[in-house]
Image (cartoon, rainbow, N blue to C red):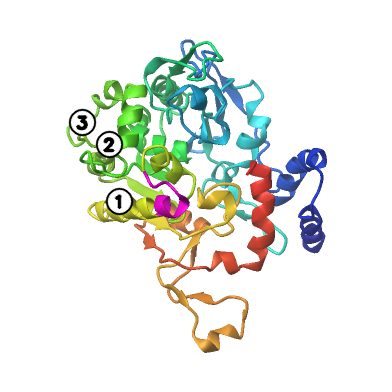
Amino acid sequence: MRSFLWMSLLALSAPVGAAHAEVLVEGIVDVLVDGGNTYPWQKVALPGLKCGNGSQYKFFVHKTGSPNVLFMMEGGGACWDYDSCSGRLGILGAANPNGIADDYMTQFTAKYVSPIVNGADPGLPFRDRKDIVTKGWNIVYLPYCTGDVHIGNNAKVYTDTTGGQAPLTWYHNGYNNTLAAANYAKQQFPSVQKLLVTGYSAGGTSTSAGYYFIRKAINPAKGYMINDSGPIFMAPNANSLSRSLHNQIRSSWNLDSVFSQLPASFNISDMGSINKMVATEFPNDQLAYTGYTMDYNYSRYSYERFKTPNDEASIHAYWKQDQDAFVTELNKYNNFSYFIPHQRAINASHCSTIITFVGAHACQRMEKKYWYEYIDSPWQSWACHSEMIPMDVFLSRFINNNQRIRIYEPANNYNNEDAGMSILAPLINGALGG
């Protein structure tokens, strides 16, 4: 069976026409991730909740009888002008600009995107499916349609600078949606043992930005937070690399109205102090950040529209500088872990908990091989000279064993030299649309 699937992937990797490729996309992903989740989902549509276009916001709940709850915040861009909110900007704009369908959980993103939701790292040819720590948990799944990392609190009118379209009224209603979902979760699950708040990309940002509110509402016996690839970097002054982005979203999304509710451990003039706040307010919780050093997605949001030069090399340099300072900050707090691999060709090295955990591993001493190490895998010039920790192992140690794990992998070419990744990555990237 595994060899059949492997031959199928090789066949699917061959060039195809555009129309045929569209038909193949779901078939490819179905093979890659074992069909995704097929849970029974309860749609929740509470009065007053809105998507950016003003339509009814919906979130979804899966009940299992477990004492544990996964609160998953979906990613998908951000917006603060006409092009990015209307959908004109495409992949770098806000997700779901037309709202959330009733059958959203059967569609591509929700069904396939997260092994953490699906409770398993999906199987691949020559690689067995592996259950992970969240298998069997209750799930509260928040789709993303407000363009404000689930935390905005503003109705904003955006003007089409081309003059071709009427002004767009956009509802950055993420904070109200998130808080309502958290309060609803408390009603449904009144005695939560373990609460994992997590999300990827924009949902990773909201994990950090909204953790205080979500955790207070649900009030579990033990809280866990994993921000996947949505870091809120420190920006204490006007010259800070991420300050321009922070100023832009602070204004567009009216974030002061939300962040003014946070305790004094948060410095409202530096959004990056949110990391200190969650660490100090919840000293017995387990908190973590994961993401790639070579991220070329979120890093573009951070700098491309605000910095010059803004070529790829410069953006990576800005990101590395911010990330170094971020790691230094997280080191101050005993309850903060980080899991930072260097690079993965999937999704421009953006997000380490989506689709598959292949390539989502980290090694503190990833180094060039010694001459005698080429015997086993002569095509690979890199080797881990400490412990290679896959994402599923990180999750198990972090949640089941309450371990603090800190790995900041050095620059290396390990994943690029992996033969399987050279086949797998283009297939997944094609399915993701880029």
Give the residues in magenta.
308-316
Q: Residues within 10 Å of mark 1 (few under 14, many from 20)?
A: some
Mark pair 2, 1: CA separation? 12 Å
Q: Which residue is denoted by mark 3 in the rendering?
A: 263
| Residue type, label 2 | Met
The residue located at (76%, 56%) in the rendering is 9
| Label 3: which secondary element | loop
Binning the other alpha carbons within 10 Å of mark 3 as few (below 14), some (14 to 19) or many (20 upward) gives: few
Image quadrant assignment for residue 22: top right
Q: Secondary structure at mark 1?
A: helix
Where is the N terminus found, in terms of image quarters?
bottom right
Judged from this view, the residue extending furthest toward the left is 264
Taking depth in this image into account, of 187 and 325 the one nearest to the observer is 325
Q: Is residue 14 magenta?
A: no
Whole-angstrom CA distance, mark 3 to mark 1, is 21 Å
Q: Which of the two labelled residues, at mark 2 and mark 3, occupies the earlier sequence position?
A: 3
Q: Which residue is mark 2?
A: 271
